[in-house]
C-alpha cells in the first residue's frame, strides 16, 4: 500500500470489507460512476479488490470535455469495460423541441424533467436485473446526504444500495487519489468539486458547500437529480 495516514488506511480497509461483503452476498452488483473523484476511488478499489463488481456510467449528452477525457484515461489505465447508457433520443428531442435546450434554468420542475430523461430513465435500464448498486456518495457532500448509511434498501429502484465512502472527507478522497495515482477529472483542479452536466456545474468558492456548484440557481434542499431521492 502506498504511504497514507493510519486514519485513511483504516477507511480503505473498511471500504474493502464492504466490497467483499457485496461480492459474497450479491451475485450481480454494479457501480454507478460519474467519473468524479469519489467514483474514481471506488473504481480503483473495485479493480484491485472486487473485479466481480460491474461498472457503468450515464452519458447524458451534455457532459464536460474533461469528463470524457478521464473516461478515456481510466479505460487505458484499468483496461476495464465500463458500460455506457445514453438517454432515449426521442425523449431528448421532444423535451428540447417543446422547452428549448436550456429550459432547466427556468424552473426546478423543468430541470428535474431534464434529469429524468437524461439520467433517471437510463439508470433504470442500467440497474435492471441487478441485486445491488454502489455509489460514491458521501455524507459531507450536501444537506440531502447528511445521514447517508453505508447500506440501505433502495425503494425507488428495488435493490440494495451501498455507499462505501460515506464517512470519507474531501481530504480523504484527495489523499487516496494522490497516493495511488488514480486518474481524476481535471475540473477538480479548477475548483469544481461536484461534477455533472456541463451547463449545470460550476466551480465553488472557499467556504461554499461542496454541492454549491451543482444547480447553483436552486435552493440546497432541491439539489438532487432523482438518482438518489428516497421514495415517499
Image (tube, helix red, strand yellow):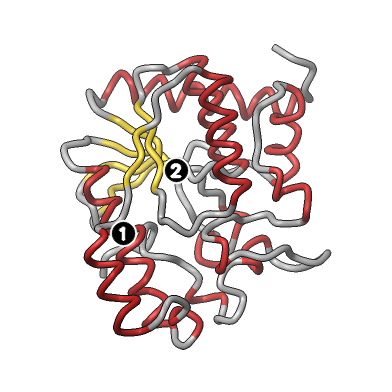
CA gap, disc 2 to disc 1?
14 Å
Q: In percent of the image, x 60 and y 57: which residue is there? A: 141
Q: Which label was assigned to residue 135?
A: 2
Q: In percent of the image, x 40 and y 36: which residue is there? A: 31
Q: Position of residue 200 (x, y in %)?
A: 56, 68
Q: Position of residue 115 (x, y in %)?
A: 38, 66
Nearer to me, 26 or 110:
110
Quickly name the residue at label 1.
120
Q: Is residue 203 above or below residue 135?
A: below
Q: Position of residue 216 (x, y in %)?
A: 61, 75
**Which residue appears farthest toward the bottom when viewing the image?**
106
Q: In percent of the image, x 73 and y 29: which residue is there? A: 7
Q: In percent of the image, x 56 and y 24: which residue is there? A: 44
Q: Position of residue 178 (x, y in %)?
A: 76, 29
Q: Is residue 120 above or below residue 5?
A: below
Q: Is residue 84 above or below residue 210?
A: above
Query: Would residue 212 be found to the left or right of residue 100 on screen?
Result: right
Q: Based on the displayed image, in which of its 4 quarters is residue 61 positioned?
A: bottom left
In this rendering, the count of numbered labels is 2
Nearer to me, 141 or 199:
199
Q: Quadrant of the C terminus?
A: bottom left
Tell me the element at label 2: loop
Nearer to me, 191 or 103:
103
Q: Based on the displayed image, in which of its 4 quarters is residue 134 positioned?
A: top left
CA neighbours of label 2 inside 10 A, class few (<14), some (14 to 19), many (20+): many
Amino acid at each position: 500500500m502506498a504511504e497514507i495516514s493510519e486514519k485513511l488506511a483504516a477507511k480503505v480497509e473498511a471500504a474493502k470489507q464492504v466490497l467483499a461483503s457485496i461480492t459474497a452476498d450479491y451475485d450481480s452488483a454494479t457501480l454507478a460512476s460519474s467519473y468524479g473523484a469519489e467514483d474514481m476511488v471506488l473504481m480503483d478499489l473495485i479493480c484491485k479488490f472486487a473485479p466481480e463488481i460491474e461498472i457503468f456510467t450515464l452519458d447524458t449528452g451534455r457532459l464536460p470535455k474533461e469528463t470524457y477525457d478521464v473516461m478515456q484515461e481510466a479505460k487505458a489505465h484499468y483496461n476495464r469495460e465500463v458500460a455506457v447508457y445514453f438517454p432515449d433520443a426521442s425523449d431528448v428531442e421532444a423535451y428540447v423541441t417543446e422547452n428549448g435546450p436550456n429550459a432547466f434554468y427556468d424552473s426546478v420542475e423543468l430541470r428535474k424533467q431534464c434529469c429524468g430523461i437524461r439520467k433517471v430513465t437510463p439508470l433504470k435500464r442500467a440497474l435492471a436485473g441487478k441485486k445491488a448498486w454502489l455509489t460514491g456518495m458521501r455524507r459531507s457532500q450536501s444537506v440531502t446526504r447528511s445521514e447517508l448509511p453505508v447500506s440501505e434498501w433502495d425503494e425507488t429502484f428495488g435493490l440494495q444500495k451501498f455507499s462505501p465512502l460515506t464517512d470519507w472527507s474531501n481530504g480523504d478522497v484527495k489523499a487516496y487519489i494522490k497516493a495511488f495515482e488514480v486518474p481524476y477529472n481535471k475540473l477538480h483542479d479548477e475548483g469544481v468539486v461536484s461534477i455533472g452536466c456541463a451547463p449545470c456545474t460550476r466551480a465553488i468558492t472557499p467556504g461554499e458547500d461542496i454541492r454549491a456548484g451543482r444547480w447553483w440557481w436552486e435552493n440546497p434542499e432541491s439539489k438532487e437529480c432523482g438518482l438518489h431521492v428516497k421514495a415517499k
